[in-house]
Each structure stands twice: as C-alpha cells, then as structure tokens.
Image (spheres, rainbow, N blue to C red):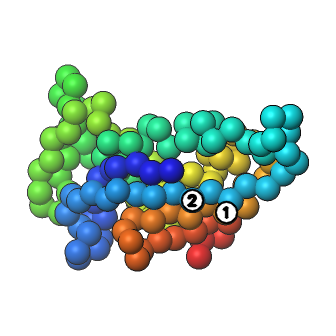
Amino acid sequence: MSFSAAHVLPTDTKCGRLHGHNWKVEVGIEGKIKEGGVVIDFYDVKLVIADLDHKIILRKSYSEEAITHSNSLKYRINGKIYIFPTEDVVFISDEPTCENIARLIWRRLDKLVSSPKVIEVKVWESEYSWSADKGGQSE
C-alpha cells in the first residue's frame, strides 16, 4: 500500500520545514484463512490509510496554535507562516514521524480486526528509511 503526504517536524533541523514523501506501507497479519481463501480483505486494510493520502499530516497540538479562517488554517511553525485548506490537513496525536505514523496505522488496524492479528506495520518514507511497529514497540 502507499500514500503521498506532507509533514513537518519542527524540532528537526532538516525536516523542520514542510516536505512530503511517497510513503510505502507493509502490513503483516496472521490468522485463520476464511471462506474465499483470505485472512483479510486487502481493501479493508487500505481503508485505514485512505484519509492520509494527499494530505498534510500535523501533530494535533499544532491545531491549538492555528488561526482558523472560514475554510483554512493558518500556522506559524519555526517562524514560517503556512496557510492550508482545512480539508487538506489530518491531525494525529504525536509528531508525524515515520515511527509514529507506523504506530498510528498499527492501532487503526488493530481496532479494525480482532482476528486475524496484526503482527507488524512497516512504513517507508524513502527507499532507505523506514520504521516498524509491532503493537506499540517501534523498531
């Protein structure tokens, strides 16, 4: 699975400015094979990342500092002012790092399925940079 999204990590020197990635997601799931020969429908798995695609992923606490104008949000991050259409922003509870996005996807999948069991979610932000989460245990 994959999605395209932008993020900013204010405390990081290089990633402290708005930038984007073509994120790749690998999911490991185990369970009993159901009628039809599948453990889980991949369509259902893809739905957990659908809201992230072509969005700007920001930490929820940034929303407290935002100034809302009708259909847009105005932010000051690292001395820069950004204005985003409200519909283009997805807020998550932690910094939008690769590690935290892997954890977010793992938690969403875990809520979606009771059986089968989510074993691992690996998120790639580039060809060589990735992070994996195994139920709250990032690698």
Q: Which residue is mark 1?
A: 120
Residue 136 visible from this viewpoint: no
124 shown above or below 57: below
Q: Marks 1 and 2, Cα distance to the nearest angstrom?
A: 8 Å
Q: Are marks 1 and 2 in contact (CB under 8 Å)?
A: yes
User: Which label is found at residue 26?
Assistant: 2
Measured as percent of width and height from the top left, residue 11 is found at 29, 71
Measured as percent of width and height from the top left, residue 102 is found at 54, 60
Measured as percent of width and height from the top left, residue 49 is found at 50, 43
Label 1 amino acid?
Glu
Q: Quadrant of the C terminus?
A: bottom right
Q: Which residue does the image show at 38% across and 71% down from the upper left?
A: 127
Please identify, in this view, whether the residue under mark 1 or under mark 2 is nearer the observer.
2
132 displayed left or right of 58:
right
Q: Residues within 10 Å of mark 1 (few under 14, many from 20)?
A: many
78 shown above or below 70: below
Please identify the quarter of the rendering in which residue 63 is found: top left
Please identify the quarter of the rendering in which residue 134 is found: bottom right
Q: Nearer the viewer, residue 123 or 82?
A: 123
Under tag 1, what secondary structure? strand
- Residue furthest top in the image: 70
Label 2 amino acid?
Glu
Measured as percent of width and height from the top left, residue 68 is found at 22, 32
14 shown above or below 9: below
90 displayed left or right of 79:
right
